[in-house]
Amino acid sequence: MYKRQTQLTTALRATGYEVTHAVPHEVRLYLNQAAPDAIVALDDGPHGWHGSDVIREVRADPVGQVLPLVMVTGAEAAVRGPATTTADLLRHGADDCLPQGCDPVELSARIEAKLKRVPVPVESLMRDPRTGLYSAAHFLDELDRELRRPVSARRGGVLAVVAVAEMNALEARLGPRVRREVAERLAGVAERLGGACDRLGWDDDGHLLVLMPEVAEETATRGLREFAESVAGTRFVVADENVRLTPAIGWTSLVPCDGHAQAEARARDATAEALRHRDLRPVRYEPWMRTSAPARHRRVRVRLSSLRAALVPLLSLVLPVVLGVGLPFVLYQQAYDTGWDAAAVAYWVVVAGLVLSALLIVLECLFALDATPRPMEPGQPYPVASAVIAAYLPNEAATIVDTVESFLCLDYPNELEIVLAYNTPHPLPVEDALRQIAERDRRLVLLPVAGSTSKAQNINAASTRVRGEFVGIFDADHHPAPDAFMRAWDWLSNGYDVVQGHCVIRNGESSWVAKLVGVEFEAIYAVSHPGRTRMYGFGVFGGSNGFWRTDLLARTRMHGSMLTEDIDSTMRALHAGARIAMDRTLISRELAPTTLRPLWNQRSRWAQGWLQVSLKHLWDGLRSPAFSRRQKAGLVVLLGWREVQPWLTLQILPVLMHAAWRAGGADQLDWAVPMCLLATALTLSASLVQAAFAWRLAVPEMSRRKGWFWRYLVVTTVFYTHFKNLVARQSHLKEALGDRKWRVTPRTRKDAASKAQPDATSSEGPK
């Protein structure tokens, strides 16, 4: 071996070259110290290395990627076959290949030819030979070729533009080369998934360009969604740094496009919209997204929105009475005139519904006693953890500093990163206070999310920023218990993917509404959630004081278009096979609304959000093999029965009206019907049982206030249950009328001083 090396060195020096030697594993070190003009390497060289090993080491370095590399084969090449050896070395990345003992003059000439020839930039090639990516210009040529085909000969087709939400931050930190590297990493995922993405390109902004000819829109959307989730769930090495990426995909159909400029502009407009949400959902182009001359479309949308805002409150109050009482009463009368007593059937259906609801409440209480206990110790050592606090600063300015300080006092045996992901329409003085805290304590990371309009977008922005193996999600009014993260890891390290904690109201003394909500939270978090989890075999993420494995959160994200993005993310995580636990000993204290108006706004959003989730996930869940029969029964109750029950209970009014009409007046009715009395007694007893279990399982600070629980029982029986049913019915009609606005009630400094929380958008609580 060394004899061959000496002969080669002599030949090179004889033709005028200076020669420096490098041994395997040290080639990259020499490249970065003083890069040579060219590299001549021995196949079957010293230390048992073959030529492919040398090529791999050289080409792995950015400097080595552009240097001429000439391989000289040895005696073993003759055994393997010279043609095979040469072809293999060229395929691995060699620029030329000569046999040992070749004419030194020929060797020198080949090296000189490589040095003098101007290399062709990859951008000038039609396709990058290494990645298969079209350059931007050639990609647009391909797109033009597709669009020039007659419309009658085109069956579908989609153009997509994929941006990365973290691109600007990556470029600022790692330099401009990351744009190309990111596009290459995205292309690698697309190639791995296969499918219809057979033409991929990239532009100077680092966008991946995807042409999907002859593909139906539904198929394209499904493929793009799978691609986005795969990218979000992968950690990439970019510029020697391990990063997580958020793909933002905008797409447009090729059929209505006149040329590549229009198609590209539409796809980029849709991508800009996808960048706002960061929720991994491919966004289809709509005319209102157009950046050029958008004023007319936007004015029309504003006018329609204003008209809807004026009509919906009136309609949503009147229509439930008309549809839920007036229309059934008329139908019962018409049916009775034809000889069919439909009201009698409805009566028994209502009674059965009341009995069923009461039995479900009692069963939840009983199962809550046998809730799955928290594992006694972690299954793995405590890793780095992250907390994400989502905040809209104009609402949170009076309380956010206290919240941040409470997080900095948490007890955790490893590093705990605290990310405050916030949005604000204008700078606020509290930001200066937060920056001072961040300078004092490096655990606090301030993450302003420009253009955000929802909590979901703030969480999505933070999901790629966090460094922890698991992440706790909190609203801006939450104060977790000191050991919250340790308790959460006990679950996550023992096979669970998400664990939902127990949210406790800390401002119950503020008003009778806060007291009511305080006890209701105990009924939900201490009884219903643990009972349902045990009863149906899955838990529910409640929006705050929930802990996720970071990889799962990155793949799932939050969808800001859903009014209860937490329940939506729960369903999508369960579809993916996630295990979700509920732990009533995992405490975080928050603020409750203190007056009825913000409580109405909050519960209205929750009710409408649950309806959205039911419409989106119930049928798919019942057909999905990911859910067991037991879990599907739980889906029917949580996503089906809860939507039917408010309207079913309302039917007692038209039934009684019809009965009074038939009897000649309400005073002629026999109110002592045994079954009616039994159903009423069972319904009232269910409320009593739930209140008793809530008191028994509540945290000590709440269970000491027995008077609150008695007041809750009375108010729930005579008012609050009907209040929530009214809210649910109105929310259903708002969804049908297209009113999905998230109404914000600003929190004032006076409210914060009294620890009140009138903002329905900030106090997420249970759903």
Image: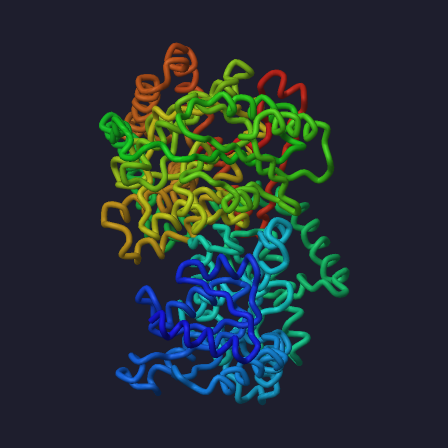
Q: Quadrant of the C terminus?
A: top left
Taking depth in this image into account, of 707 and 696 the one nearest to the observer is 696
Residue 210's place in the image compared with 477, above or below, is below
The location of residue 378, given as percent across then percent down, is 29, 31
Q: In which quarter of the image is the N terminus?
A: bottom left
Question: For the point 41% across and 11% down, which residue is it?
Answer: 705
- Toward which corner of the image does residue 429 lie, by quadrant? top right
The location of residue 397, given as percent across then percent down, is 65, 27
Question: For the point 44% across and 25% down, which residue is it?
Answer: 588
- Toward which corner of the image does residue 358 lie, by quadrant? top left
Relative to residue 582, is residue 252 drawn left or right?
right
Does the image show residue 542?
yes
Colour scheme of the picture: rainbow
The location of residue 34, given as percent across then percent down, is 57, 60
Taking depth in this image into account, of 663 and 511 the one nearest to the observer is 511
- Toward which corner of the image does residue 122 lie, by quadrant? bottom right
Relative to residue 643, is residue 167 drawn left or right?
right
**Labels in figure, total:** 0
Taking depth in this image into account, of 448 and 521 the one nearest to the observer is 448
The location of residue 604, given as percent across then percent down, is 53, 38
Does the image show residue 601?
no
Relative to residue 26, is residue 174 drawn left or right?
right
Question: For the point 30% across and 22% down, which residue is it?
Answer: 689
Taking depth in this image into account, of 735 and 290 the one nearest to the observer is 290
